[in-house]
Image (spheres, rainbow, N blue to C red):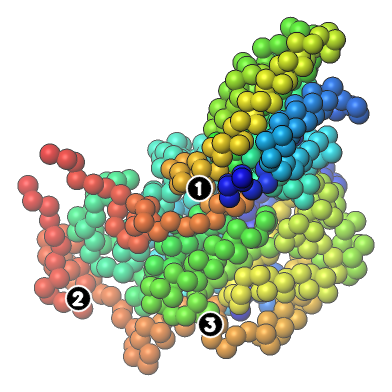
Amino acid sequence: MTSPVTAVPLKLAVVSAGTSDPSSTRLLAGRAAGRAAALLSGNGRTVATDVVELREISADITAALVTQLVKPGLRQAMTILGEADGIIASTPVYKAGPSGLFTSFIDVLDNDLLIAKPVVLAATAGTARHALVVDDQMRAMFAYLRALTVPTSLFAAPQDWGDPALTERIDRAAFELALLMESGFARQVRDQSWQSYQHEYGSAGGTQTSIELDTDLMRLATGGSAWRPPAN
Amino acid sequence: MQFGIFSVSDITRDPVSGETPSEAERIDAIVQIALKAEEVGLDVFAIGEHHNPPFFSSAPTTLLAYLAAATRTLILSTATTLITTNDPVRIAEEYAMLQHLAKGRMDLMLGRGNTAPVYPWFGRDIGQGLPLALESYNLLHRLWREDVVDWQGKFRTPLQGFTSVPRPLDDVPPFVWHGSIRTPEIAEQAAYYGDGFFANNIFWPKEHYIRLIRFYRQRFEHYGHGSQQQAIVGLGGQAYIARNSQDAKRAFRPYFDEAPVYGHGPSLEDFAELTPLSVGSPAEVIDKTLTFREHFGDYQRQLFLIDHAGLPLTTVLDQLDLLGGEVVPVLRKETEARRDPQAPDGPTHASRVRAKYGDLAPRQPRPNANRGDNVTGGSPYSDTAADLSAQYPEL
């Protein structure tokens, strides 16, 4: 038995800021994506996975950062994230923080693009000393975007690739993500409560183009002043 | 349809010669650019307003008044006048004065301004920028239409029995364009008052303001100012023209690559493909400009940005020869041929006087003799109904 809700195919987006090929950052995200997709398929859900390799659109990201021009490669990445039911975001750590490429990409996204979307946060580094970057910095960044980060963070320093505990954490994070994607939380928040969040005209990756007439500012546009007599 | 140029008044190093003009040189240059615009047959010259280097235009009405005396046909305008950090009372006074001196050959475009420190420098809160802009224009609109205004607002000191002088020329307020590319409230305000709506059209994606312009047209009709096709729309754009495409790209590239707004980012080719910028032969610039009408509908004013990014004066004057000599005549012919018969002409003082008075003589306000003030009686003007009087607050 499939209800109408479960019949809807799910979209999973992988964002990787890895710069080498192959990249351990991409590998970590890919393994989590593979596990999540397998769990969802096992539950009878169709999953389409799109990968955004930030390396391939690094020039677009820079152009948007310094000139606000959104080129087609970046536009496509925004569309993928805007349509995603779940996201896995993975970055290398070089200097005690997410890489500049990763944060630059986040900087050029609309603030409302990821509202309520479940996200697995992942990072790789050359040393275990960077292990808290995910919880300490990435989680705050995605909280600002009002995304729903899963409880389990993924982090892999070189020695972790030989440790079965990494696979356990990947499985755990993938399970959490799959559960949140299946629940339809993001869709319901966006369908039923979208207007309760702050939006700018043209935001949400260019999809936020409805115009509300019944607002104080719209009334102010038609004469009068913003002054109100003080309440007694 | 009106064609012209608009300048942001930047003083930018010429990346080819390495020279940066002095403020004095750039101000002299802008006067020559405006005079040349008239000479080559353009209709409009508009200047920006800034309050920080490297810009020179902090006092647009002073420049425009000088140009009014030095020109005969050019419509003098702004791009934009800051409706947030200027006191609307001062805007009413300064632009009405300009309107008299220019014999009506002027209008203005209002914008909020995006230089954050300007707000606190003028005692304003950028967080309140939109309500400030909306309220300020509501007051400005009244100051030009009511001889005596009583006002209580949130953002400026109240007015009781205030008369903005001089009254607008022929008692017909200057035409106002509201500039915006992403603020529905500004489009709504333009529509409510039946004013013009201007999209700077420098950056795309155009889809956002295609929708905003459509919204403005719908609301213009909703408020009873005419059909959607009769709404007054203006667009910006930027061009660099040479006899052939390769020369245009070669000559403009160093300026593009170091331009203050989009330099050091996308390539010239990408930017030209993804935005309204055209760099090429007259035919290429004509073709691209004609696509604007397909996106936004028939519109009344097209302004080009041509004097920015350190382009030297001689180059800008050559650009004007090509723009006025080869591009605009074709654009006039082609847009005229394609235009919906309902679409109005660009606004002029003469057309607005005719719309208000028909064949009757325009009102010429004359102050009552020797009253000494305008708060102790009904009206400061001899032709106003005697029963019109200021409303005073109760103590």
Name the chain letter of the residue that bears numbered label 3.
B
Vertical arrangement, residue B192 with respect to residue B273, above or below: below
Instruction: Kindly identify the residue that appears in the image at 81 percent across and 9 percent down.
Output: A163
Instruction: Kindly identify the residue that appears in the image at 29 percent across and 57 percent down.
Output: A224
Name the quadrant of the C terminus of chain A: top left
Q: Is residue B112 visible?
A: yes
> Do the residues under discs 1 and 3 have CB atoms within 8 angstroms?
no
Picture coordinates of residue B390, whole percent (x, y): 15, 62
Name the chain letter of the residue that bears numbered label 2.
B
Name the quadrant of the N terminus of chain A: top right
Q: Circle 3 is placed at which residue position?
A: B344
Discs 2 and 3 share one subunit: yes
Mark pair 2, 1: CA separation: 57 Å
- A72 or B145, which is in the foreground? A72
Neighbourhood count class around disc 3 (C-alpha, 10 Å): few under 14, some 14–19, many 20 upward: some
> Do the residues under discs 2 and 1 have CB atoms within 8 angstroms?
no
- A20 or A48, which is in the foreground? A48
Q: Circle 2 is placed at which residue position?
A: B384
Q: Amino acid at mark 2?
A: Thr
Horizontal side of B304 relative to B129 (left or right) equals right
Mark pair 2, 3: CA separation: 32 Å
Name the chain letter of the residue that bears numbered label 1.
A
- In terms of sequence position, does the residue under pointer 2 or pointer 3 come before the other? 3
Instruction: Kindly identify the residue that appears in the image at 8 percent across and 51 percent down.
Output: B394
Q: Which mark is residue A95?
A: none
Discs 1 and 3 share one subunit: no
Picture coordinates of residue B294, whole percent (x, y): 68, 74
Q: Circle 1 is placed at which residue position?
A: A191
Neighbourhood count class around disc 2 (C-alpha, 10 Å): few under 14, some 14–19, many 20 upward: some
